[in-house]
Amino acid sequence: MWKKYAGYLKQILPLMKNSLLPVLLLGTALGAYFMLAPFGEEAQRFLHVGFFLSCAASAGILIYFNRNRPLFFVLVLLIAYCLINYLKFAHGIIYNLTADYYNLCFLTAVCFLFFYFLPNRPLFSFDTVNFLIVVFAALALGEQLGRYRVGIDFSAFFCNGCGLQTFGLALFLSVLIIMLVHSSIRDEILTTSLFFATVSVMLGFYLSDRPSPLALFFFTAALTVLCGIIHSLLYAARKDVVTGLDNGNSFIRAQASLPLKYGLGIVCIDDYKHLAQIFKKSGIDEIVVMIAKKICELEPDAHVYRCGADEFIVIFPAAEKGASFARVDNIRRTVAASEFLLSGRKKALKLTVSCSVADKKRSDADVFEVFMRARKILQKTYKFTQNITSQA
């Protein structure tokens, strides 16, 4: 019985790994609100400064690594926090009944949803200009509607909420449901972090009539995004973000721990560029994941690395001479005999892989010499034929 529950636990824990830190941050914020609020002046100043420093740190990291996701999410978060405080200063206790506040709630939720699905691309590109135009257009729309005292809100048909009107609350909840479904499917660090950051922002809006929770939950949102960015970068330094396998950096670091005798196999997806053109990024990622799972199912004791877009490296520790060839060729034959069904397609897809194998020799100084021998024979064979296993 204990083994059965241990098996369930092993299946559940990987699904929780991306949510653990955001849940801890949100739980800590909720605990602080219920047990310690209202905060003193020094504590509120700390939360204000922490919010702006977290936003600045997130922006600095993303600019340094030339990534656009989730920079615009942070930008909208920063603008929303500044505008809420401005409206509270300008209108006093009736700030949450103004058209400007209604529009801010609506546009913040919509912009969060829009930038949540933003693909991770280089920051310094023409797309960045377009996304900045979207942000400025949203600001201009909110300003013009507020000038004519037109608020995007339908709360007159419902009961009012607290700092967040019922329509705004329903809108945020709808956005969160969409984000939750997407993060459950994709299971990525950043998507999960942005979901929990949006939960914190919703709580900040809902309790914005009090200064302590407003600063607390917006700081929690900014800190959640910052931790998600750092976590995703650290993860990408050692893992392939598509398959979850160890990447080329891990392969380099693992050479010191390899045994004296091992076999190295290279598995290359045939016609990868052609498949990428047909199925685009989401489809080719799904193909790569299915082939990676197939390799891991066939060789649970081997170490599998994804070291290129179309290339996997399989290390067979303590493999006898010639045994690695049979194991890699079994991978090739199994993939060729399998049918792969992509999401949204009724017809199964047939795929093939080309492989090469090299066994560690005494004359090999390190794993890179073994790898280069396998790579050369694969390149030589690949010029003439595919779906074949070659021995170096």
Image: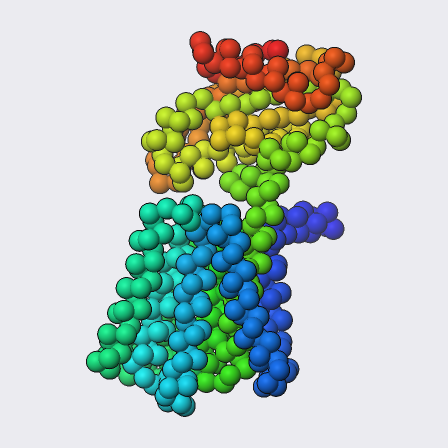
- Compared to 317, does 383 lie above or below? above
Q: Which residue lies furthest to the top in this view?
A: 384
Horizontally, residue 147 falls left or right of residue 306, namely left
Viewer-side residue, 294 vs 200: 200
Question: Where in the figure is residue 345, as x and y percent of width and height?
Answer: 35, 37
Horizontally, residue 296 falls left or right of residue 134, namely right
- At a point 39% along the width and 57% down the height, the residue shown is 115
Viewer-side residue, 56 vs 155: 56
Q: Which residue lies furthest to the left in this view?
A: 148
- Compared to 278, does 212 lie above or below? below
Question: Where in the figure is residue 327, as x and y percent of width and height?
Answer: 63, 19
Asked where in the image residue 28 lies, by quadrant, the reply is bottom right
Asked where in the image residue 356 lies, by quadrant, the reply is top right
Q: The C terminus appears in which quarter of the rendering?
A: top right
- Compared to 45, does 330 lie above or below? above
Specify the color scheme. Answer: rainbow
Question: Where in the figure is residue 253, as x and y percent of width and height?
Answer: 69, 34
- At a point 35% along the width and 79% down the height, the residue shown is 101
Viewer-side residue, 41 vs 2: 41
- Compared to 272, does 128 lie above or below? below
Asked where in the image residue 355 lies, by quadrant, the reply is top right
Viewer-side residue, 224 vs 304: 224
Horizontally, residue 315 falls left or right of residue 244, namely right
- At a point 62% along the width and 26% down the height, the residue shown is 314
Residue 8 visible (yes or no) = no
- At a point 62% along the width and 65% down the height, the residue shown is 24
Residue 234 visible (yes or no) = yes
